[in-house]
Amino acid sequence: MCGIVAYVGERTAYPILIKGLQRLEYRGYDSAGVALFNGKVRVYKCKGRVKELQTLARDEDVSGSIGMGHTRWATHGEPSDANAHPHRSTRGLFHVVHNGIIENHLHLKKELALRGYTFHTDTDTEVLANLIEDVYREQRVSAELATRLALTRVVGAYGLVILCEDEPGRLIAARKGSPLVIGVGEREYFLASDAMPIIEYTDRVIYMNDEEVAVITPDSIDLKDLYNDAKTPDIKTIRMHIDSVDKGEYPHFMLKEIHEQPHSVTDTFRGRVAADSSKIFLGGILDVMPLLIEARRVIIIACGTSWHAALVGEHLFEQYARLPAEVEYASEFRYRDPIVGKGDLVIAISQSGETADTLAATRLAKDSGATVLGICNVAGSSIARETRAGVYTRAGVEIGVASTKAFTSQITVLAMMAFLLGSKRQALPPDNYRALINELTRVPELISEALGQEERVREIAHLYKGVSNALFLGRGILFPVALEGALKLKEISYIHAEGYPAAEMKHGPIALVDDSLPVFVLAPTDRLYEKTASNIQEVKTRGGRVIAIATRGNTDVYRLADHVIEIPPCREALSPLPAIIPLQLLAYHVAVARGCNVDQPRNLAKSVTVE
Ligand code: G6P
């Protein structure tokens, strides 16, 4: 959601900015723009894709070794050429690219309009550009001080990069709530919303903290907080390889990421389980282990797919660690004055580590005195830094907007945590603990076997690509998988889909069943198989079409269902991992057959940095 990229150095900025914007396309956007400085500032921006921006700038002067670019995901004002960033202040002294939301922009706009400032867009960012210009002119201070003073008047979130025409040769950057990473090169700096546009130039980065402002020239970086206290930049080395941001032989990132799962899950548990399956070792939560052992309950907060992983976690914590567990949408948790405090364990799950609601809920939980852990994929992300301890999922860069490998890695981490806690809390006998760890190490193999069903899934996808609705049913630990299967399908194919607990179908969704409704049923051979088989019959007798996801070797199910997709036998605790694979593939192949933009579905964003 919204992406910033900026450059200051000795090279021509434009190609770096364009490439950077392309690297940020995965976040989701509807318009794009750049501002370049070479004697004066030139701005090119338009509604649409980066490709269209390139066409627009094709015959223009794109010289200059300082510049900034932006991909916008509309919040204030529709997607349009005018609303695209960068935005300019009334006298053109300041140009700004901004991620986040200025909540008091209407109030500020009214005030600035009375003082003669004019507005040509519907955005909150234009208000900010004018506010900075106003402070700069009225108080006759430097652009950097004007920025800091202006920002003390702002309520909301921002990741900002600013060009001041009066002060050439530098960029000003500021952050509160919306991430900004500074890449440190040789006589050059790169700025971006995440490390993706930076990694091909340098592996040395500074993650800006909230309420920090940086003035950056090719040779220097001057970092301060909003109140003028100098800060020392903390340069970190990141390990991210440029290959991870290429599709390789795959037509889409999503398909590549689905197929990466045997490896990504291995990376998640590698070095964290003993070779003889006797132990789990999670270095990131070692320090807080006594608090975890003593915890009276766990609350897991997340959004989207991460929330579905959390629901799997709920089963795992209750069943294997005998720890009462609750799962909440971060956006609901934070606004309902929750009863949470010392003695509670709160786990925030977020692939990006930047989801605004999850971040705010994390802070609330922290302030309440709970022990707060993070399960994040992006190292150095805001939630990872905000939490006291945690476990990285190590799934690698996930670019497809529809999350796949992050989900399976999140479940893998939750399983490791639950088994480890179960053992420490003496809720899990040593033999079971060992058996579960052993099964965990088999998961990559199980996922590979499930991937082997791709051709079958593709055929089924083609049979049902024209439907308008679909139902996904599951029980127990596979109910969240039904929810996730439905979410995947609607996200990328725009087919309305719902996930339901299989038995609950009788209380409503059954009214929808007719021969145009495909019903995907997770029906592994487990302790509830007979019950699920009855649910399949309920659908069949009403003319519905059933696609069963069933355990290899179950011949009975072929009698009941219209189609069967086989998954390998697996212990219940880890069954969501192979079971989600056919549903990810299904969503993918249906979306491709319908001609949808799989990696960047309409209206969605990879990293949701607004509330
Ligand atoms: C967006 C993405 C989803 C993701 C959700 C939560 O909606 O499109 O794929 O599950 O945000 O993101 P997070 O980064 O917090 O896991």
Image: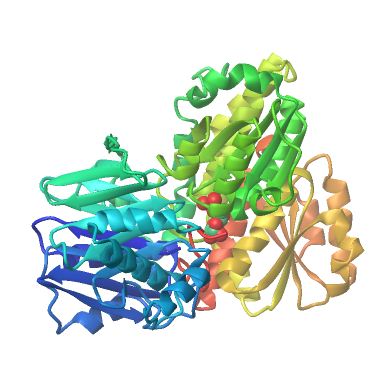
Percent coordinates x, y for residue 203 in the rendering: 24, 42
Who's the residue at 31% across and 78% down the image? 90
**Quadrant location of the N terminus?**
bottom left
345 vs 379: above or below: above
**Residue 96 visible from this viewpoint:** no
- Quarter assignment of residue 571: top right
Nearest the eye: 170 or 593? 170
Nearest the eye: 572 or 390? 390
102 vs 229: above or below: below
Nearest the eye: 242 or 177? 177
**Quadrant location of the C terminus?**
bottom right
Q: Which color scheme did the rendering employ for the protein?
A: rainbow
**221 left or right, relative to 365:** left
Nearest the eye: 486 or 557? 486
Who's the residue at 37% across and 80% down the image? 116
Percent coordinates x, y for residue 7 in the rendering: 20, 58
**Residue 182 visible from this viewpoint:** yes
**422 left or right, relative to 243:** right
**54 left or right, relative to 377:** left
Percent coordinates x, y for residue 56 in the rendering: 24, 83
Ligand 1 quadrant in view: bottom right
Count the marks: how many? 0
Percent coordinates x, y for residue 517 in the rendering: 76, 74
Who's the residue at 45% across and 29% down the image? 270
- Quarter assignment of residue 499: bottom right
